[in-house]
Amino acid sequence: MEDEQRLGRGRYLAYQIIGIVVGLALVAFGVVAFFAGGGPFVAAIAAIGGTLAVIVSIVDMVRS
């Protein structure tokens, strides 16, 4: 039973790390879109979405 709890906890941590990586990728894509002329709205949506994904992942990581 302890192994199942450890496995579940590790899987949840992996999901949080993946959320941080995806969030940082969205922020990077937003910055690239802005400087490549993709438009400020597209860049802002990507950057805000990425920032929120990173924040949620970090808060979940701290709370668990």
Image (tube, rainbow, N blue to C red):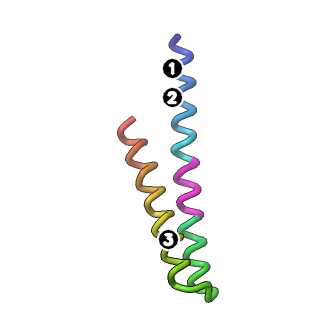
Instruction: Give the residue type that dot 3 points to.
Output: Ala
Q: Position of residue 20 (x, y in %)?
A: 52, 53
**Which residue extends farthest bottom?**
37
Q: Nearer the viewer, residue 46 or 57?
A: 46
**As drawn, is 49 to the left or to the right of 36?**
left
For the residues bearing labels 3 and 1, Cβ distance under 8 angstroms: no
Name the residue rendered at 57%, 86% in the picture: 39
All told, the count of numbered labels is 3
Point out which mark residue 47 bears. Answer: 3
**Camera-nearest label, 3 or 2:** 3
**Camera-nearest label, 3 or 1:** 3
Name the residue rendered at 48%, 76% in the picture: 44
Q: Which residue is mark 2?
A: 9
For the residues bearing labels 3 and 2, Cβ distance under 8 angstroms: no
Point out which mark residue 54 bears. Answer: none
Q: Which residue is mark 1?
A: 5
**Pointer 2: residues within 10 angstroms few (<14), some, or many (20+)?**
few
Instruction: Give the residue type that dot 2 points to.
Output: Arg
Q: Which region shows up in magenta?
A: 18-25
**Pointer 3: residues within 10 angstroms few (<14), some, or many (20+)?**
many
Instruction: Give the residue type that dot 1 points to.
Output: Gln
Q: Earlier in the sequence, mark 3 or mark 2?
A: 2
Relative height, residue 64 to residue 7 (above, below): below
Q: Quadrant of residue 62?
A: top left
For the residues bearing labels 2 and 1, Cβ distance under 8 angstroms: yes
Q: Position of residue 45 (x, y in %)?
A: 50, 72
